[in-house]
Structure formats: structure tokens, C-alpha cells
Amino acid sequence: MKHLNFLLILILLITSCGGDKKKEKQQTAVPKNKLVLSESQMAHIKVDTVHEQKLSDQLTAVGEVSFAEDNVVRIYPIVSGTVEKIFVSLGDYVQKGQNLATLLSMDMSQIQRDYNISKSNFSVEEKNLARAQELFSAGMMSEKEFAAAKKDYNNALSELSERTQILKLYGGSSSDLDAIYNVVAPRSGYIVERSITEGTQIRNDNNTNIFTISDLKTVWVWASIHESDLSKVSEGDEVQVKTIAYPDKIFNGRVKKIATMLDPDSRVIKIRTELNNNEGLLKPEMFANVIITPKVSEKAIVVSNTSIILENNQNYVMVKTGENEFKKVQIKTGRVFHYYTEVLGGVEVGQRVVTDGSLFVLTAFNQL
């Protein structure tokens, strides 16, 4: 009997010790509905806050970068001739008054010749007037003859003034007959177009510009909007522009102008936005993706598009619940925009969700 009692007590002691160990294991184990990441794993993910944002139905259109016409100068030939030398290349920055090219021109030669003839005639008439003044003062010339001499002098002076202005307008030299016309920059900026090479024959009745200068600090982006979407766009709407060259960079602007005429073939209308281009990244003729957000908008709870993972036809996000702790939460989504998705249920404003690395975190959670 004593032996039996001793065995029962021993079994109870062993059972109670085993139970304590199980309790300790349960207390130290992480609940299965939460995932804890190490510091090294945390370095590979990013977390963002669920927040409210003004949203409206965005419109995406294809666009093209062009010069800001308000800041462009096109240089046309004003004389005929042959391009002798070119001093600038496409893309060069030039200062106002800088010489861009020289033309060997018969027009320029004629202008210089006319100037020198008028200068010579004036010199003769100036001497004639001085002689007439002496004769008139001595009583050896009539008043009528003296008046005629003054008239000839004034006519020569007027002719010389006119020829001097013309010569100055064409940038010619008053010292020699070199027949050279200098093409100079009327303003500072970049050479964005050049249509001549050395030896090119130019006519002054040609309507093709030989140089185009733009500072490119501001550029225009023209986007094509379909007729059916025209009612959704108005001046002042926010515009985001992305290019193939810089896919991760967004250029922000607003709709500045909506064209008044519809293209009869494509049934699209052009809208224009103006962008700051101080960095010089945007180049004319670049293709662009234009996202237009109307001014009239409403607030909605949103999460980043990269936060959402589709699993078994359901949408989930990984919510941060504590220090390096995460859990999987099913959400109900609404409208999808370019960068954000509207959330109708599942998470609240202020909660933190994984953005970059969300699939990795969900996969790790499912393996618990």
C-alpha cells in the first residue's frame, strides 16, 4: 500500500512538471496569426500609412514635349547667299549677340556699296556747302545758289543716314566691302534646331528658319484627348507627366490651354501643360504619358497599389501590428488609380501596411 501511494505521488509530480514546461512553451511561442521579421529582413521592406487622399477619375493620354513658344526665337535668312562658316552646333548654349554663322552675300555687298557711295557723296556735298558758305559770305554767290547748295547737302546727309541704318540693321562693316553677313543670336539660349551646313545656298524668300534658340527652362507638353473625354478636362486640372527616358520621375503641372479645334480625322483635341525644366531633362519631341486629375475630387481611404496582394481572388495587405510584427488582413477595394487604390473596408486610416516587399512578407506569413 505504501509502495502504491509513493508511485501515485511520483506520477503527479512528473505530470505537473511536464505541464509547466508546456505552459512555458506556449507563453514564449509567437501566435500563429502574426509574423515577426528579423532586422535583416526588415531592411528589405518598406511600410507606409493608410491615409485619406483627394481622388477623382483620372484620365491618361499620350503626349509630346515641345518648345515653349513664348521662349523660342526662330532665325530666318534676311539676305541671299552661301553659308561660309558655322560657329555653333546643335545643343550649344549661346549668348545674346554671339556670332552663329557667316554668309557670303551679294545682297550684303550691294548694301555696303550703297553705304560707301552715300558716304562719298556726303563728303563731296559737305565740302561744296563749306565753299558755298564762303562765297555767299563774300557776296560772290546768290541766295538762291546758296539755298541749292544747302539742299544738296541735306539730301546727301539724309541718304547717308538711311544707308547707315540699313547697314547697321544687316550687321555690315562700314570699313570695307567684305560682302559678309553675320548671323547673330538675338537672345541667349540653346541651339535646338539648325537647318544649314557650310556651303548651303540660302535665299531670303525661303520660309525655313536656319536656327532656333530656346532657353528650355520651360517646356510645353501637348496631350491628345478623345472627343468623348473632353467634358472631363478643364483648365487648371492637375497634370502628371512621365517619360520613357525617366520612368521613375514625375513632372507636375496644370492644364494651361485647351485647343478650340478638333482634329477631323483622329477626333482628338490638344491640351497643353507647361512644365518647369530647370534641370534640362525634358527635350522637345520626347513622347510622354500624361495623367490628368480633375480639380473636382472627393476624399477616400487609399493604400499604395504595391501594398495589395491577390490571393485566391481576394485582396490582402500585410498590416504592421507591433515591432517587426505583421499580420495578413483581407481588404475590400474600390477604384484603382495610377499609384493608389481606394479601400472600402478591412483597414483604417493610420494603420501601417507593407508597400515594398509585401509579397515576400505574405509568403512568409503563409508558412507559419
Image (tube, rainbow, N blue to C red):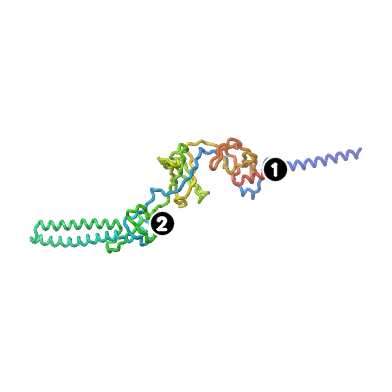
Q: Position of residue 326 (x, y in %)?
A: 64, 42
Is disc 2 surrounded by few (<14), some (14 to 19) or many (20+) residues within 10 Å? some
Q: In the rendered picture of this protein, how many numbered marks are placed on residues?
A: 2
Counting from the top left corner in percent of width and height, residue 279 is at 46, 52
Question: Up-down: is 1 above or below 80?
Answer: above
Cα separation between marks 2 and 1: 65 Å
Residue 162 sits in quarter:
bottom left
Question: Looking at this view, is 154 or 28 the one in front?
Answer: 154
The residue to which callout 1 is attached is 30
Q: In the current view of this chain or complex, which residue is farthest to the front? A: 265
Q: Nearer the viewer, residue 183 or 52?
A: 183
Label 1 Cα neighbours within 10 Å, binned few <14 / some 14-19 / many ≥20: few
Image coordinates of residue 348 in percent, x first then y, are: 59, 37
Amino acid bearing label 1: Val
The residue shown at (50%, 48%) is 243
Left or right relative to 95: residue 339: right
Give the residue pinned by disc 2.
93
Quarter of the rendering containing residue 13: top right
**Secondary structure at numbered mark 2:** strand
Q: Position of residue 141 (x, y in %)?
A: 9, 60
Residue 268, which numbered label?
Answer: none
Left or right side of 323 for 297: left
Nearest to the eye among marks 2 and 1: give it.
2
139 vs 65, nearest the viewer: 65
Identity of the residue furthest to the right in this view: 1
**From this viewpoint, which residue is outermost toward the left?**
139
